[in-house]
Image (spheres, rainbow, N blue to C red):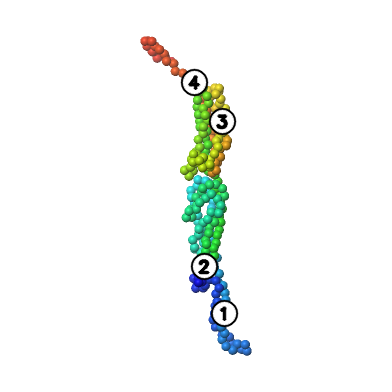
Amino acid sequence: KQSCNEYGYQLGDNVLQGELTLAANTNNTSSQTALFKYKLKKASQLITFLPLSNQVYGNAPLQLQATSTSTLPVTFKVITGKVIIDQGVLSLTGTGDVTIKAVQLGNEFFEAAAVEQSFSISKATLTLTADSLSRILIDPNPELTYTLTGFVYNEDAALLRASGALSGEPLLTTTATDASVAGIYPIEVALGTLTASNYEFDLVDATLTITQNEHTITWDVRGGTVIASEV
């Protein structure tokens, strides 16, 4: 069964039949039946798919927007990239290049059509801060520690390490030694072996403060009276 468009014409092969009357002459002395064969093809359609700007890991989901000249609904498909699409809403799941295809499959009147858009997802930034520490003169240097802040999508260091998306350790150093005199010494931080799939790092140094020993002197008055000192 052939389908008809809004004008009643059938798609596919068609035959137009009618009577053709010609003026009498030596070749034609009566009316004739004429047949005209033609094919009615499906109409084409154009999709308008709004461009997608580059993203940063951690951005909110995007509502994809595309329309077709046929007014038929447009669907979306991930060609490449770390994203997911649910009912036209695109969510980021990683970093790198992404290509999305807007598709209209057509129907009995319109040919299928598709348009692609591409964009990139860059890494989010974690702040790697060396912890500021202190000790007294007679103690050895404490263990140098650090703090990571700036996680997105409710992620944290433990979760990312368990999934393999975060690994390694930064390199923390100080010029202070166990024999250093009282003073303030820098704690410098470098990436070391620390890597993350979806994050880059902003490094923040800190300080180690070494203070003099404090002594408390207690006098045994042996029954006497303590007299406040005069300054």
Q: Give the amino acid at mark 1.
A: Leu
Q: Give the amino acid at mark 4.
A: Asn
SS class, disc 3: strand
- Percent across and percent down for residue 156 are 48, 40
Distance from label 3 to label 4 (Cα)? 24 Å
- Percent across and percent down for residue 213 are 49, 20
- Taking the spot 48% from the left edge, 42% from the top edge, the residue there is 155
- Percent across and percent down for residue 103 are 53, 59
Task: Decide which of tag 3 and tag 4 comes sooner along the chain.
Answer: 3
- Taking the spot 53% from the left edge, 23% from the top edge, the residue there is 182
Q: Nearer the viewer, mark 1 or mark 4?
A: 1
Q: Give the amino acid at mark 2.
A: Phe
Distance from label 3 to label 2 (Cα)? 71 Å
Task: Decide which of tag 3 and tag 2 comes sooner along the chain.
Answer: 2
Residue indicated by mark 1: 35
SS class, disc 4: loop
Of residues 192 and 122, the one nearer the viewer is 192
Residue indicated by mark 4: 213
Distance from label 4 to label 2 (Cα)? 90 Å
- Percent across and percent down for residue 52 are 53, 53
Residue indicated by mark 2: 109
Q: Inspect this view and state whether residue 50 appears.
A: no
SS class, disc 2: loop
Q: Give the amino acid at mark 3.
A: Thr
Q: Nearer the viewer, mark 4 or mark 2?
A: 2
Task: Decide which of tag 1 and tag 2 comes sooner along the chain.
Answer: 1
- Farthest right residue? 26
